[in-house]
């Protein structure tokens, strides 16, 4: 079920409950509102019902398997060695074999690549799911080579990488131009991605001008899957995940 359908289903349920509520005996209504089952805000008080906004479906930002989990330098995955259970290989052009994403993200990646191709824009998948162990090796290598301070600037610590969720991917131009470089944003492919990603449930996770909030330099190639409804909401509130979801800025690690 998509986010939009889930939201519509919730609103439908709410509408049914509200209709019943308006004709119900107040004592029955107050009993109902004390039960732990779902009830829309304002039900037990008609006065507040008119002032409170429609109930929004709650997004889960902490469970590692949630499509809306927030991962940054202040919010590692918990457990740190989390691994998704529904990884699959999206059917898209790829620089390496067997790059994997969570099933729903893989389907959305196929849609995004197909829509790009229909517009004459040829994308390639450069990176997708990366395991805790893989990130341990990568980050550890940088620490050995440059020390921790420099390693933290160019690589996520294991357990802190959004790639470990299986909901993030790095995309590039099929031509190879500006692969994993800032200038990707200036290519036709990068511009297409910036304009169309959200329509397929993806957001450009580390946009320009948000380094102090996201903790990362702009990465026009790094996309995060959140679903079409959440992506539209993030874009509408400025395009920065931390801000849109009400989190503090995460410029650096806690320690
Ligand atoms: Zn990335």
Image (spheres, rainbow, N blue to C red):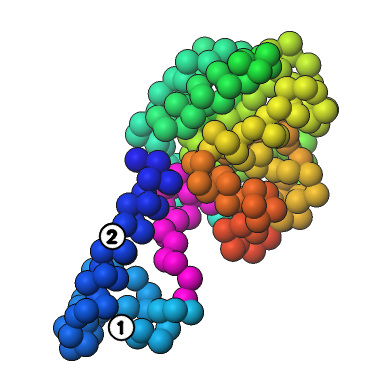
CA gap between label 2 and label 1 equals 17 Å
Q: Quadrant of the N terminus?
A: top left
Spot occupied by residue 71 in the image (x, y as percentages of width and height): 55, 49
Q: Residue at x 57, y 12 (%)?
A: 93
The residue positioned 76% from the left and 50% from the top of the image is 211
Q: Is residue 105 above or below residue 68?
A: above
**Residue at the location (78% across, 16% down)?**
177
- Look at the picture and state if 9 lies above or below 21: above
Label at residue 156: none
Percent x, y for residue 201?
A: 53, 38
Q: Is residue 56 magenta?
A: yes
Tell me what residue is drawn at x 40 percent, y 29 percent: 103
Task: Tell me the crowding category of disc 2: few under 14, some 14 to 19, or many 20 or more residues within 10 angstroms, Cα based.
Answer: some
Q: Main secondary structure of the magenta part?
A: loop
Rendered image: mark on residue 44:
1
Provide the residue span drawn in magenta.
52-70
Q: Are marks 2 and 1 in contact (CB under 8 Å)?
A: no
Q: Which residue is mark 2?
A: 13
Taking 85 as reference, is 180 left or right? Answer: right
Residue 91 lies in the magenta stretch? no
- In the picture provided, is 22 more to the left or to the right than 147? left
């Amino acid at each position: 079920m998509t986010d939009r359908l889930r939201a519509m289903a919730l609103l439908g349920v709410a509408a049914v409950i509200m209709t019943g509520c308006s004709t119900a005996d107040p004592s029955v209504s107050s009993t109902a509102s004390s039960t732990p089952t779902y009830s829309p805000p304002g039900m037990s008080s008609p006065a507040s019902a008119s002032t409170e906004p429609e109930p929004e479906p709650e997004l889960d930002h902490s469970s590692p398997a949630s499509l809306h989990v927030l991962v940054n330098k202040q919010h590692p995955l918990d457990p740190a060695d989390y691994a998704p259970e529904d990884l699959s290989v999206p059917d898209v052009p790829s620089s390496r074999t067997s790059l994997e994403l969570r099933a729903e993200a893989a389907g959305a990646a196929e849609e995004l690549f197909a829509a790009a191709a229909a517009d004459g824009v040829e994308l390639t998948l450069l990176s997708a799911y990366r395991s805790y162990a893989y990130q341990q090796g990568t980050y550890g290598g940088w620490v050995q080579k440059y020390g921790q301070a420099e390693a933290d600037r160019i690589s996520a610590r294991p357990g802190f990488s959004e790639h470990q969720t299986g909901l993030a991917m790095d995309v590039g131009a099929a031509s190879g131009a500006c692969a994993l470089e800032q200038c990707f944003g200036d290519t036709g492919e990068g511009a297409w991605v910036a304009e169309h990603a959200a329509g397929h449930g993806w957001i450009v996770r580390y946009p320009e001008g948000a380094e102090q909030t996201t903790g990362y330099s702009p990465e026009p190639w790094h996309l995060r899957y959140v679903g079409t409804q959440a992506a539209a909401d993030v874009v509408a509130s400025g395009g920065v995940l931390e801000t849109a979801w009400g989190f503090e800025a995460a410029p650096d690690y806690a320690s």
